[in-house]
Image (cartoon, rainbow, N blue to C red):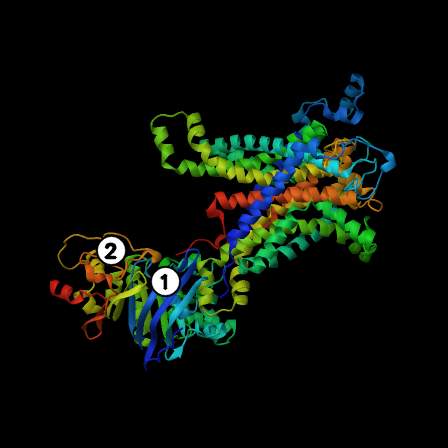
Amino acid sequence: MSVVFNFSWVRHGLLLLGAILVGLVVFCAVAASIISPYSPFDLDVTLMLQGPSAEHWFGTDELGRDVLSRTIYAAQISVEVALVAVGVGVIGGTVIGVVAAYFGGLADIVLMRLMELLFSFPAILLAIVLMASLGTSILNAMIAIGIIFIPGFARLARATTIEAMQQQYIEAARAIGMSHLRILIREILPNVVTPLLVEAAVAFAYAVLLESALSFLGLGAQPPDPSWGNMLNTGRGFMAQAPWLSIVPGMALFLCVLGFNLLGDGLRDMLDPHLRD
Amino acid sequence: MLRLIFTRLALFVPTLFAASIILFIAINVVPGSAARSALGVDATPQAIMRFEALNGLDRPLVVQYTDWLGKALRGDLGTSFQNRVAVAPDIVKRLPVTLELAVIAFLIANLIALPLGAIAALRHRKAADIVISALATILGAVPNFWLATLFVLLFSLTWPILPAGGYTPFFENPMRNVVQMILPSLSLGLVSSSLLLRIMRTTMLEVLNSAYIRTAYAKGAPERVVMMRHALRNALIPFFTVGAVEFGFLFGGVVVIEDIFRLPGIGSLVLVGIINRDYPVLLGSSLVITVVVLSANMIVDTIAMMLDPRHTRGGGH
Amino acid sequence: MSQPKPPVEGLTLDIKHLSIAFQTRHGSVTVVDDVSLNIGKGEIVGVIGESGSGKTIASLAVLGMLPRGARVLEGSVHLSGDSLLDQPESYQRAIRGDRVALIPQDALRALNPTLQVGLQVGEPLTLHRGISWATARKKAVELLRSVELRDPEQRAVEYPHQFSGGMQQRAMIAMGLSTEPELLIADEPTTALDVTVQAQVLDLLRDIRDTHGTSILFITHDLGVVATLCDRVYVMYSGAIVEEGPVERIFSNPSHPYTRGLLDATPRVHGALTGLTPIPGQIPLPDARPVGCRFSDRCAFAGAECRQTPPAVTIQEGHISYCVKALELETEA
């Protein structure tokens, strides 16, 4: 009989790690101008494609710009896009999901079938198609990704609303004549928030991934704005001479996504113990 | 059994129609964007009007849609704005490339996810579980295009053992084809395996906690027999159902991977479509990818249902 | 662990001073405390207790299937003279399902939903007798017939969800009988069934004992079932045995306040309807037991002497009560 591993240490540790990584990214985003050694736009062609050194910890890119600074500033774009996209998704999804659950019947069926269908679309495809019409810019990427998130949050909001509605106090509130809207806001919404928060953390990770994929394809952040995605894209062309251009931004991306994922998983363990193993 | 398949198909067809409507709406979200994108920012109003008339873009959206759909059902996906070449034949030529990539990546993902997920569940909270779960978490955070880039860096540049791109049809040179597929399908498959692994672990855990597994052990069955004869089939049913969502991610990844490795598949056609603002190309290729994904979903769902005797054999006594 | 006592000749199951504890975050928690019970050849012995009394865990120890985190602190378990504890897993696996068979509660959930019933019923034979699946399936049909399932050939190729509750339980019994075990452990096999089906299953078990001489350990919380089926009964409370003896004696002369309470709380058809009296309070958590007699905080007769470990009081030959006031209770009855 082997000893049961003390799992709570591992779980707490992972949540902490996630929080640290996310904190680091957010810090970079917020304090970019303070902590980065150079401006991300400062180019100096004489310094191009230099390897890591004392003056440039992560080297320079094809236009002589400091890779470290650009990596730090790129966090801004990732965090911005993730915030807006998840915001759009949460608000849109919550409205649709709660309405579907609360009013039930035909509205529920139609809305949820629609959400299910949207959910099966390859996300990046839908984003690309949306951006064909909206135009390829960072803002449109935010909107497109946000629209993609709506079905996921709608499904969640609907499930938690249905669960909340089973509770007795909803019947009591209706019995005393509370209006639909007041019930929705006062009784149902607070129960929806917790699992939504967990989903949001995971969605942040996915938003960062999507945005960077779009930028990698040249459809998101446009040069000279630094995004981890477009940095990796330009780095592609110089793999032989300057491999650090392909490693550093990717590492930043990886740590950011990992952080949000760990945060989401950790939060889920903390707030919803019956979802635990 | 046949009735089951028939009903699934019957429900599937309207889903496809709905998907085509969604794509059509998405690409027309901003009216008039097609002409302006194709002709550029400096286009004169007359040029735009001429372009729209030429391509039927001045008609009401519903008419445009039904026209497009009608042609699509007959195999005509329009002609490219750029070079006036028919879109459908190009897609047909590219489809095998994408399918080959997707299938191999899918196989890799499952070959990793199924055994590792099952082992992690079996050794729940012991060392093996922790290591496997950590691996899954890490793999799940790696962007597949970064992994692809790193692979090329390592295996094409640093140690030149694998090609950095290009495609040879299988029947021309099978060896070359397979070698060229290694890095792309690994990049796609490894990252995909992460989610599938976690799904397998969760479903297997639930199964292993079931009363019938305890019965199997109580009969004196060794662990191997319990896993293979009792646990596996019961875990695969929800695994297929939930795991079908991975197809969407897989085919999304195809777009980027084909770009990196210069594979002439439908994914890269989507890219061509968006970069050139070539609406028929973009719409056509997106539609085909979506149809493939939805079909894969439906097939896997149906297989899951067929594996479950509670669906195939009716009620009781 | 203390030296296992040598087994008494002729007993099918001999458990002596078995103590089992769980390792939790709050330390070691004893869930089975110094339990001794035995079953002779062809005897049907009941173990009665509420959930949390430790009866199921004790039976899992016999099967060698203690859950993760549970440890045997002391004691011995012998099956027809063979020691079961402290044996390698391969030895226990050879016995499990062959010489000792489990009939669990909730037959629907205890059957594999994706495997034909016939294959499941015949599985112990392929595991322990090395026969082929085809032969096992044929034997399964016979077994299903022996538990009075109509049209057993058809039943064998069906799936569990196609059976009714009673049929499922019979299939489980058939599964247990397949290897002609010395001991059947029936864990609440009739709890999920309705009364008429219950009676049929109990008759079936009695027939099995009469025909094959199989010993049965019958675990339940239902006094009525014990009265109908069992020869002897052990009453368990919060991990320990509080009373044991022949069924007629226990029912006619309950000599422990807990047993008294159980009988008073059970509706009975015969006798005056004096109203049901549930036992006040709740079964204590294993780490919050009262000092001395563990029933003392719910007992109407508790006194200062109950803070000591209760002694074994022999009321009659074979009838023992673990209560310091057992004999006083008797005169009160």
Task: Tell whether B195 sits left or right of C309.
Answer: right
**Which chain's residue wears label 2?**
C
At label 1, counting other C-alpha atoms closer than 10 Å, the crowd grade (few under 14, some 14-19, many 20 or more) is: many
Residue displayed at 49% across by 38% down: A194
Kindly report the distance in space between the C-alpha atoms of the residues bearing marks 2 and 1.
Answer: 19 Å
Q: Amino acid at mark 1?
A: Thr
Task: Say which label, 2 or 1, has the lower sequence index.
Answer: 1
Residue on which disc 2 sits: C297
Secondary structure at numbered mark 2: helix
Q: Which quadrant: the N terminus of chain C? A: bottom left
Q: Eyeballing the image, is C97 above or below A115? A: below
Q: Amino acid at mark 2?
A: Asp
Percent position (x, y) of residue B186? 72, 52
Percent position (x, y) of residue C117? 45, 64
Residue displayed at 68% across by 55% down: B108
List the single residue furthest toward the bottom: C9
Percent position (x, y) of residue B96? 75, 48
Secondary structure at numbered mark 1: strand
Looking at the rendered structure, which numbered label has been put on residue C30? 1
Q: Eyeballing the image, is A177 above or below B147? A: above
Task: Tell whether C229 sits left or right of B101.
Answer: left
Viewer-proximal residue among B276 and A135: A135
At label 2, counting other C-alpha atoms closer than 10 Å, the crowd grade (few under 14, some 14-19, many 20 or more) is: some
Percent position (x, y) of residue C333? 13, 63
Residues indicated by labels 2 and 1 sit on the same polypeptide chain: yes
Viewer-proximal residue among A208 and C174: A208
* Tag 2 and tag 1, C-beta contact below 8 Å: no
Query: Visible in this render: residue B119?
Result: no
List the single residue furthest toward the right: A46
Task: Tell whether A268 sits left or right of B106.
Answer: left
